[in-house]
Image: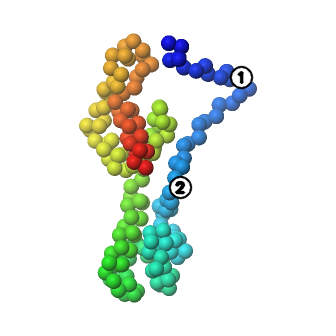
Amino acid sequence: MENRKRPAEPSVSPGDKFHTPQKRVSLVPVWQPDSDFMRWGIGETCQYLQREGLGKWEEIFRAEKITGVGLRYLRDADLEKIGIKCLGDRLQILHSLRKLWQIEAEAKKVFNDPIHGHVELHPLLIKIIDTPQFQRLRNIKQLGGTYYVFPGASHNRFEHSIGVGYLAGRLAQ
């Protein structure tokens, strides 16, 4: 029975200040482009092409002075006009540019989970969470009748599902 008890909390002296816990950072560095690509200059545009594996077209983009503002309006005919003759290459470039628009449109949301702290969820999960079926989970207790004995045990299915979604994302990463 002794091993099931929580460890004793260290005593805090009155002189100690409360420190807000720091946000947990992923150990895997992932490049996140600036969502405001409309402010990109020629250099940032070419860096994006390099990261997308399209570095062989960097010189053409530099020669044509295509910046972030021009990316939004770039079409297949425009790419052909500036010298990208192969249809596959043009489609690959356009596909990479569409990713920028999705990044801008779909922002992640942050939830404050009682167990995992600040949790950042994918936009697809946000769409699922916003359904009426998922919202009904707020009224279902995760611990059932335990709440009547221990009023502090107020964990519900909604909170539990947010944590499960976070952990599933971590597992997939």
Q: Whole-percent x and y of residue 126?
A: 35, 46
In front: 130, or 148?
148
Q: Whole-percent x and y of residue 48?
A: 48, 69
Name above or below for residue 55 compared with residue 34.
below
Q: Whole-percent x and y of residue 116?
A: 48, 36
Farthest residue in the left direction? Answer: 133
Farthest residue in the right direction? Answer: 15
Is residue 38 in view? Answer: no
Name above or below for residue 50 compared with residue 117.
below
Q: Label 2 is placed on what type of residue?
A: Pro
Q: Which residue is mark 2?
A: 29
Foreground tag (1 vs 2)? 2
The residues tagged by marks 1 and 2 sit, at their Cα atoms, a distance apart of 38 Å
Badge 2 element: loop
Name above or below for residue 13 compared with residue 70.
above
- Left or right: residue 114 compared with residue 86: right
Residue at 39 percent across and 69 percent down: it is 96
Q: Whole-percent x and y of residue 148?
A: 37, 13
Residue at 47 percent across and 32 percent down: it is 115
Mark 1 in CB contact with mark 2 (< 8 angstroms):
no
User: Residue 73: which disc?
Assistant: none
Residue at 46 percent across and 80 percent down: it is 56
- Residue 85 sits in quarter: bottom left
Is residue 56 in view? Answer: yes
Rate crowding at label 1 as few (under 14), some (14 to 19) or many (20 or more) other CA atoms within 10 Å. few
Residue at 55 percent across and 42 percent down: it is 23
- Left or right: residue 136 compared with residue 74: left
Q: Which residue is mark 1?
A: 13
Q: How many marks?
A: 2
Rate crowding at label 2 as few (under 14), some (14 to 19) or many (20 or more) other CA atoms within 10 Å. few
For marks 1 and 2 on the same chain, the one whose residue lies earlier in the sequence: 1
